[in-house]
Amino acid sequence: MTNPVIDNIRRSLGRTVQSPIEPRPVIYASRQAESLESDMEHFLDEITKLSAVGEQLSPKEIDSALKSLVTEQNIRKATVWETASLRQLGVAEILNSLGVELVSANADKYEMAQCDLGITEADFLLPETGTLILKSSHEKPRAVSLLPRIHLAIVRPEMLRADMHQVFAEAKYSNYLVFITGPSRTADIELTVTLGVHGPRNLFVWVVEDRKNHHN
Amino acid sequence: MTHEVPTYIGFEEYSERVPASIPSAVQQATNRFVSGRAARVSELPQWEELRQIGSDIRLHTIEHMDVYLTRLEEKVKAAGGHVHWAQTAEDANRIVLQIAREHNVKTAVKSKSMATEEIGLNHALEQAGIQAIETDLGEYIIQLAGTGPSHIIVPAVHLKKEEIAAIFSEKLDMNAPADPIELARIAREVLREKFLNAEMGISGGNFLVAETGTLVMVTNEGNGRMCTTVPDLHVAVVGIDKVIPDWESLTVFLKLLARSATGQKLSTYTQFITGPRCEEGEFGPKEFHLVLLDNGRSNVLKDPVGREVFKCIRCGACANVCPVYKNVGGFAYGWFISGPIGAILSPQMLGTKTARELPYASTLCGACADVCPVKIPIPTILRHLRRRVAQGDAIALPTMPAPIRVTASLASLALTQNWIYRFGTRLLPTLMSVFRRDNWVPSAPYPLSRWTKARPLPPFTAGFRNWWKNVRSAKTKESAR
Amino acid sequence: MPKAQLFITCLGDQFYTSTLQNMTHILERLGVELIFPPEQTCCGQPLFNNGFEDKTRPVALNFMHAFAKSDAPIIGPSGSCVSMVKHHYPSLFKEGTPEHTLAVDISSRTFEFTEYLVNVLKVTDVGAVYSHKVSYHASCHYLREMGLKTEAKTLLNCVKGLEFVSLKEEETCCGFGGAFTVTYPEVSRSMMENKVKDIVASGADTVVMCEPGCLMNVAGGLHKAGSKIRAMHIIDLLASREDTL
């Protein structure tokens, strides 16, 4: 079956189907990981520069942290990724106890758009740019980090990767990935930076680890 | 700016009618981006290395475009997506319309896409009774305003907040305040309802990864995610020149793009979309259509010099440093793409009859080539295209108006037959003395009047040859005595 | 005693007699024996840059034949003209032809004036005296095509009494661009006016540059704006022995 576009390309380039294909140019080594503490510091530093809020917490502190968040941000409706890790931390239960109405993560778009808060994990973290990387699946819906006005990502230090190279090597066969680097923003009107145009206005990133295992 | 493909781009005429507000507004944007870029570039000691690799990979891909596009199609289909090939703009519009009709689409939400501006997709949809709503804030504003983009990255930068408030007030039937944050909030509310109810999301794409059939979108506002996540149907219209070999290559381009464009390390959202959603119950489009747009690109590939234009990753850095662009803004370039890259792409895609003025819209200063993240040799390509206009080449006949070609022939003659030149040189000071006032020639007849309108000429002294022959050698003879 | 050929450029020929005389004086003071081939006209850059490559070829041949009579290096007071010869002449002729061989030879021994002083003669101090506040406009082809990023400032550094002030937009094009001033006069004017504003804002009383083309444009623009700031070719400044204005 001929494809006129491909045919025209070949004609223009003087190529045939049998023309040799040279390998593409080599790309050199990527950034090396520093120590976990150092990379985490970079990561949180970048998060702050992006006008997002980053914190390091132990699992026990989640309760009070959520309480503050709900109060300060006036959270009435929330939706949470139904993943093992977030279940283990008891996020849904805590929200329930705070009187927050929980919307299923698999609810339809109209319901999701009503939510004030969407809570996810992250599959990977990049320290150089303060980036969260999220995959997509039935239990990790894309809408949770997109439709509510506030996005909270509860992440673990093990998710840190030195560079994009590592992330791609591990995740390139996913059907969907999103890199989130700060809250939604624009400078379209007179170059005034405005946050929260269409995506979430606020981004909170909580790095949770068991302090008992964390040596100073 | 209309949806129609221009039949002639009168850069000179446009440049004479630039509204007074444009240069200062454009320069505010470009200054911000230039200093941002400088800061980000200084953070990466391997910047020059990245530029070279980026250039090499893009060139390699251009030279093997058939291979990578074939692989791309295979992979997109394997992931459950549909692939359509659009040879012309009409083909592309027809394909998108057909998809829309098959799905009973009444409203489509659009993420920023220069390819769709190139083909005039919005107009084609409107004609068919389908509402096509731009959702990128800048694009939304200019859609309401009915004008074209003045800058690749911030298309509405030429409008003041008061003007935007007036546009919102009129078109949205409300009392919009002249405050950027409030205006953005209004746009968010209005467009949110559209996102939720639209049957189709239309996007462009920054890169197409052949290795896995992945569409990469680099955005900041979240509307790109909304358009490609919320509606059940996602249609992406992407130029064939956007294909890259693999994910490893992406690491280079993602490091180059945001830094060069806005001075960010990475844009807020970068999406990697491979086909429609995978699982039942997964949030995301049920159907994914990729429309690959040729529209003359495959013909441009014939020219080994000109085709380097396809290395472009649409960062806008060239425009940000171009002193010509900064003084005229985007409209003067007559089509969807402006600045130095526009000056070398439009003449190749529209031809040197329509766009014969564009390759000359430059002083060849070279500032653009210094900042291009993929090392496109813009001044070289400008000269190459000027050659096409002035004397023609393998691709096209000359289109330079006859009077200019005649002048060039006369000049060439005078400069080759050096007795003519030397005779003229002896004559000119006498001829021009009538126009001399003190140490200047403030006005002179056509064509020199085109110079003197803006500033005086220095006087025609032309005394060196005589001095060397008669005065200096006499002195030398004297001191030798 | 080194020999050199004077490449006076068409603009120098028409408008800058004293600059060319100063170039002669400076080089002779440095012990260079000068030759002036009178058959030279123009390097052909205006034709070449506007796409008239075929019409440039005979002009280039005239240039090369004029300067081929001697094997001495060729020195010009213009980065763009020298760049034309150095970087574009060989590409005008088919490889393997005698014209191409000649072009390669000529291009290999053509130098811009400051390049010749600093990089070939290894001279940075020519004994100049100029006690003024001086700013510098880096001409585009001189800076980018010729890659001369430090030579002019090195020479200015050794001028007695000179106080250097930087232009904020030192490397921004002044709008001359050869024929650009007459093809798009409005845009050229805007660019020139921006450059003038920048020079005035620097507080300098002199602005110096290494291109006759830029000089024509900027000097005219400063005069039109009613400014008393003096625009000079670097050669004239380097020839200055007393405080003259």
Image (cartoon, rainbow, N blue to C red):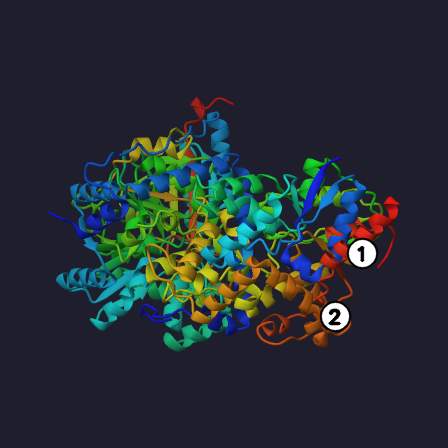
Indicate which disc residue C1 carries: none
Q: Residue B18 at what x, y percent from top left?
A: 51, 72
Q: Nearer the viewer, residue B185 or C154?
A: C154
Q: Residue C159 at what x, y percent from top left?
A: 81, 45
Q: Nearer the viewer, residue B358 or C97?
A: C97
Q: Residue under label 1, please give it.
A: B471
Query: Are labels 2 and 1 assigned to the same chain?
Result: no
| Res. B254 image quadrant | top left
Instruction: Return the chain for callout 1.
Output: B
Residue A181 shown left or right of residue C160 in the figure: left
Residue for point 52% across, 67% down:
C183
**Compared with residue C227, is residue C9 higher up or lower down, i.e. above or below?**
above
In the picture, which quadrant includes the N terminus of chain B?
A: bottom left
Q: Residue C61 at what x, y percent from top left?
A: 53, 50
Residue B129 shown left or right of residue C174 in the figure: left
Residues packed near mark 1 inside 10 Å, few (<14), some (14 to 19) or many (20 plus): few
Q: Is there CB contact under 8 Å for labels 2 and 1?
A: no
Q: Residue B379 at what x, y percent from top left?
A: 48, 52
Q: CA distance from mark 2 to mark 1?
A: 36 Å
Residue for point 66% across, 75% down:
B443
Amino acid on which the number 2 mark rests in the picture:
Gly
Instruction: Return the chain for callout 2.
Output: C
Disc nearest the viewer among 2 and 1: 1
In the picture, which quadrant includes the C terminus of chain B?
A: top right
| Res. A164 image quadrant | top left
Residues packed near mark 2 inside 10 Å, few (<14), some (14 to 19) or many (20 plus): few
Q: Nearer the viewer, residue A86 or B87?
A: B87
SS for dot 2: loop
Amino acid on which the number 1 mark rests in the picture:
Val
Residue B172 shown left or right of residue B34 in the figure: left
Indicate which disc residue C226 carries: 2
